[in-house]
Amino acid sequence: MIRGLVLPELGALLLSDVRLVGSSQVSRILFLVDTGAQHSILMPHDLRSFSDLPLGDLQEGPIVHGLGGNLRSRIALSSLSFRHESDARTTFTLPLAVSRGVGQEDLPSILGRDVLFRGQLSVGVRGLTWDVEPGEHDLTT
């Protein structure tokens, strides 16, 4: 089981170690949990952690609706790794939308249904829990 935070002024959050193919860096990203979002997306503030990522080489991604407008995105092959209370890890390999959106620098990165629905998510008085199988999960197909 993975535990997250719930902040009344922001919402539910999960911490992940993120790797992007094409970058040598690994970054800890705090994702806003959004069950209304079809796609997970790395926003400009967090994308800065991957300064060596050649953004121009990435393929066009989905247009992400919401977040104050429609965001154009690019796709980066990524791995998102989450730590369980038992210290086991769950790692998802997936095409992750990334945004360079002007005016979106203050928005948090979003963990959407493409990842969240791989387990049972609960949010309540005790915070957030996400019951998902430890191990590797390939979401590239």
Image (cartoon, grey):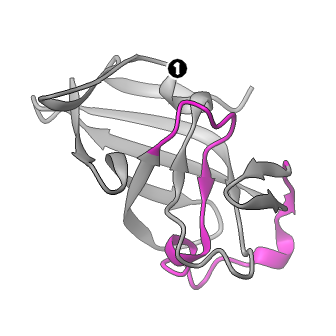
Q: Position of residue 31 (x, y in %)?
A: 43, 52
The residue segment tinted magenta is: 33-62
Residue 125 higher or lower than 75, as above or below: above
Residue 15 visible in the displayed image:
yes
Q: Amino acid at mark 1?
A: Phe
Residue 131 lies in the magenta stretch: no
Q: Residue at x 52, y 20 (%)?
A: 117
Residue 120 higher or lower than 104, as above or below: above
Q: Residue at x 71, y 61 (%)?
A: 68
The foreground one among 16 and 69 is: 69
Residue corresponding to mark 1: 117
Q: Residue at x 39, y 67 (%)?
A: 27
The foreground one among 10 and 29 is: 10
Q: Quadrant of the C terminus?
A: top right
Residue lying at the far right of the rendered structure: 60
Q: Is residue 10 shown left or right of residue 55?
A: left
Q: Position of residue 87 (x, y in %)?
A: 13, 36
Residue 34 lies in the magenta stretch: yes
Residue 73 visible in the displayed image:
no
Prevailing SS of the magenta stretch: loop
How many numbered discs?
1
Q: Position of residue 83 (x, y in %)?
A: 23, 40
The foreground one among 32 and 81 is: 32
Residue lying at the far front of the rendered structure: 9
Q: Residue at x 15, y 28 (%)?
A: 125
